[in-house]
Amino acid sequence: MKLRLSILMMLLLLIGCNSKKQNKIMIIKKEIEFNTNKKKVWNLLTNPKMTKQYMFGCEVLSDWNVGNTIIWKGYTEDGKEVIYVKGEITEIIQGEKVSFTMFDPNIGIKDIPENYVNLTYELTQMKNKTRLTIVQGDFSGAENAEKRFEESKGGWDMVIPLMKKLVEK
């Protein structure tokens, strides 16, 4: 009797463990080569006048110091100012790498640390080209993770060609 009960408990435990929803890692990684130098690509990423031209009309605003804020500000069709993304700079090597947290305060989810994702831009100089590596995520622990992940992937697919066109002209 004790043996059957032990086997039943083990089976229930195994079934329970296997039925738990496993979080998949949801990280976007893009590598883009620009036919220009690092300085021009860095300017593309950090200059509000440039970001406004490729990032859906949003200006990136920050003093680019670790621990300080970063926001993406834009305007609605009726001219109302909106903060579309906010976060905090977590790492910076001027002209080479910047990492920050990001959160969209307009999508109806709680403004808590679990709902922020990380975004890193890293530049590598190669002869007459610059490689930009973009890493964004992990979305898996955030609310509406799948939707946010897919929207971000689609957004990068729209933005990257505009970035290349701007910096390589």
Image: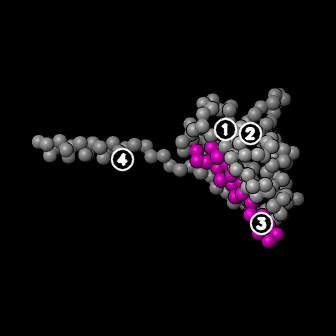
The secondary structure type at the circle numbered 2 is: strand
Which kind of residue does numbered mark 4 sit on? Answer: Asn
Q: What is the magenta range?
A: 117-139
Q: Residue at x 65, y 53 (%)?
A: 135
Nearer-the-camera pick, 161 or 120: 120
The mark found on residue 18 in the picture is 4
State yes or no: discs 3 and 4 in contact (Cβ < 8 Å). no
Please tell me whether mark 3 sits on a helix, a strand or a loop: strand
CA gap, disc 4 and disc 1? 32 Å
Mark sitting earlier along the chain (1/3): 1
- In this rendering, would 101 be left or right of 25? right
Q: Are marks 1 and 3 in contact (CB under 8 Å)?
A: no
Q: Name the residue carrying label 3.
A: 125
Label whose residue precedes the other's in the sequence (2 or 1) = 2
Mark 4 or 1, nearer chain start: 4
| Nearer-N-terminus badge (4/2) | 4
Tell me if residue 50 can be seen: yes
Where is mark 1, residue-wise? 103
For mark 2, what is the residue? 69
Residue 33 horizontal/vertical position (percent):
75, 63
